[in-house]
Image (spheres, rainbow, N blue to C red):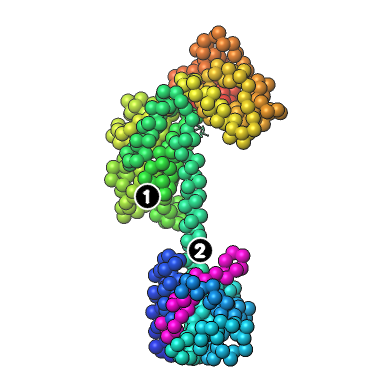
């Protein structure tokens, strides 16, 4: 029998089993150490005891103590440390039945002082490395520890050491996780959203209100206006900030692929489904799901989406079992969704479901007052506060139409910071498109960039998004058209 090989009696083996169960159900570090201490003392009838653990620098620290006053600990460190040091050095347990006469402890004057009779000290070993030790002694009772006690404690300390290591590891990871979450959260705090314009102030007011609820929010706005930034800010300043923020870009997926991404699938549900896979909705359980470019979701998937949004229920592809999730949904679009509804491309019921609160993010050219603030904000970020912007540059920026909105402004600044030599960013550091047609007397509506982008959008719409037809109508090559679509970040 196993307990024979451990040199334990049947009773001891049973108490070991019981002890294992006790410490395996303890989650918190401090509680675990306390439990280990109690079991160790009780199992051998010790009077006093303590546990030391090694810290990062290899120093030994007393973590819990029993019947040793806090004020005694200093002195006891000396007593015990002779015993403990022996344990640590030899990585082996020691037992002494007559502490006063034990040559190994002869430098421990406190043995006399404290009348210690018998000592047991066992190492806490993990994979052969010593992480600490358990110390136990008797004084007044004149009780003497036996080899049977030692055997039990040796077996117990093996289990205890692994439990300590596991809980310690888990707590470290948890702490790190909270720290990381805080850091990510800080990056998305409302303070990082720049904008003093009336429109931005109104938006921030709504953001702070919806953050503390689970209400579905739809963010509408051109590319680069900050939809994702706002979505993340709502998540990280809301009730679900310790849950995940899971973004999914709905555009550009073939129909089935989007469905399997969102809902997951059962092994064998289709060719290539070699394993079971959880969908993104499951990943977002307890957190926030961000449906980016929701206008791109095919009608067939919209039905399933509606169901999750209404009841939190869905099925993985190929599965009959229903699953339940608790997610908050934020959606974004750079199209006018209502128009898609009218055209029959977007379900009306889904539209009303997701737009309980609709936030429209105006293009930068409609909140020009924010341009200097944003420019300074990005210069500070990209130059770590070491550079300035000339007045002339700000003036040029105020006149530029920013078809790519804040993302374009951010890119321009990061480019200019790299290009500029001195402390100040000047006109010559700007990319060429900003320097064209910057005469302030010309009204913005005449700006070639705006006109060109508008012409392209019109052509694409009339050509029902057929790029070759649109290019022909515009009198340019398809290749040029594609470049311009990319340049103006036009999403069709
Ligand atoms: N008000 C703001 N203050 C500071 N930075 C901003 C602001 N709005 C947007 N940004 C920054 O501009 C960039 C673009 O924003 P974001 O990705 O949120 O835009 P988007 O609307 O999701 O664009 P797209 O439709 O192209 O995906 C990001 O780097 C974001 O941090
Ligand atoms: Mg986005």
Q: Position of residue 82 (x, y in %)?
A: 59, 80
Residue 286 circle label:
1
Vertical placement of residue 167 versus 114, above or below: above
Of residue 45 and residue 275, the one placed in the foreground of this image is: 45
Image-quadrant location for residue 237:
top left
Residue range of the region highlighted in magenta in the rendering: 42-68
Q: Position of residue 287 (x, y in %)?
A: 39, 47
Q: Going by the image, does 303 lie left or right of 481? A: left
Label 2 sits on a secondary structure element that is helix
Q: Which residue occupies 56% across, 82% down?
A: 110
Q: Going by the image, does 355 lie left or right of 142? A: left
Q: Which residue occupies 39% across, 84% down?
A: 14
Q: Position of residue 164 (x, y in %)?
A: 49, 70
Q: Residues within 10 Å of mark 2 (few under 14, many from 20)?
A: few
Label 1 sits on a secondary structure element that is loop
Q: Which residue occupies 63% across, 78% down?
A: 89
Vertical placement of residue 245 versus 363, above or below: below
Q: Nearer the viewer, mark 2 or mark 1?
A: 2
Counting residues from the start of the chain, the first of labels 2 and 1 encountered is 2
Residue 169 circle label:
2
Res. 6 visible in picture: no
Vertical placement of residue 423 versus 443, above or below: below
Of residue 478 and residue 156, the one placed in the foreground of this image is: 156
Q: Position of residue 299 (x, y in %)?
A: 35, 36
Q: CA distance from mark 2 to mark 1?
A: 24 Å
Assign the N terminus to one quadrant of the image. bottom left
């Amino acid at each position: 029998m196993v307990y024979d090989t451990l040199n334990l009696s049947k009773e001891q083996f049973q108490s070991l089993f019981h002890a294992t169960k006790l410490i395996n159900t303890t989650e918190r570090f401090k509680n675990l150490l306390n439990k280990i201490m109690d079991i160790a003392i009780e199992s051998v009838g010790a009077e006093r005891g303590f546990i030391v653990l090694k810290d990062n620098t290899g120093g030994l620290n007393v973590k819990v103590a029993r019947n040793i006053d806090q004020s005694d600990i200093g002195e006891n460190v000396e007593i015990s440390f002779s015993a403990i040091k022996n344990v640590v050095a030899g990585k082996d347990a020691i037992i002494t039945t007559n502490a006063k006469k034990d040559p190994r402890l002869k430098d421990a004057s406190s043995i006399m002082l404290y009348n210690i009779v018998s000592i047991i000290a066992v190492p806490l070993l993990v994979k052969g490395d010593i992480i600490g030790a358990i110390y136990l002694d008797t004084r007044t009772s004149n009780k003497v520890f036996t080899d049977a006690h030692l055997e039990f404690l040796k077996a117990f300390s093996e289990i205890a050491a692994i439990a300590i290591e596991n809980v310690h590891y888990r707590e470290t990871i948890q702490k790190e996780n909270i720290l990381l979450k805080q850091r990510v959260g800080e990056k998305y705090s409302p303070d990082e959203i720049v904008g003093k314009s009336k429109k931005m102030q109104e938006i921030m007011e709504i953001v702070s209100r919806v953050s503390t609820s689970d209400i579905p929010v739809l963010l509408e706005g051109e590319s680069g206006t900050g939809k994702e930034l706002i979505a993340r800010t709502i998540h990280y300043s809301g009730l679900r900030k310790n849950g995940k923020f899971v973004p999914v870009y709905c555009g550009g997926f073939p129909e089935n692929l989007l469905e399997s991404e969102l809902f997951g699938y059962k092994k064998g549900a289709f060719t290539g489904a070699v394993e079971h896979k959880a969908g993104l909705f499951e990943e977002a359980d307890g957190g926030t799901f961000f449906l980016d470019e929701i206008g791109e979701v095919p009608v067939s998937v919209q039905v399933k989406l509606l169901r999750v949004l209404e009841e939190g229920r869905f099925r993985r592809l190929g599965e009959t079992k229903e699953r339940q999730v608790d997610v908050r949904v934020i959606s974004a679009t750079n199209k006018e969704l209502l128009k898609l509804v009218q055209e029959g491309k977007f379900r009306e019921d889904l539209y009303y479901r997701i737009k309980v609160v609709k936030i429209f993010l105006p293009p930068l050219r409609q909140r020009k007052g924010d341009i200097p603030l944003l420019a300074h904000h990005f210069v500070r970020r990209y130059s770590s506060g070491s550079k300035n912007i000339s007045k002339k540059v700000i003036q040029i920026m105020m006149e530029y139409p920013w078809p790519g909105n804040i993302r374009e402004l951010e890119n321009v600044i990061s480019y200019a910071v790299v290009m500029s030599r001195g402390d100040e960013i000047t006109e010559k550091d700007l990319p060429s498109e900003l320097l064209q047609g910057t005469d302030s007397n010309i009204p913005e509506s005449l700006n070639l960039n705006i006109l060109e982008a508008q012409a392209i959008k019109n052509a694409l719409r009339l050509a029902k998004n057929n790029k070759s037809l649109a290019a022909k109508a515009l009198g340019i090559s398809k290749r040029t058209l594609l470049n311009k679509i990319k340049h103006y970040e036009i999403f069709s």
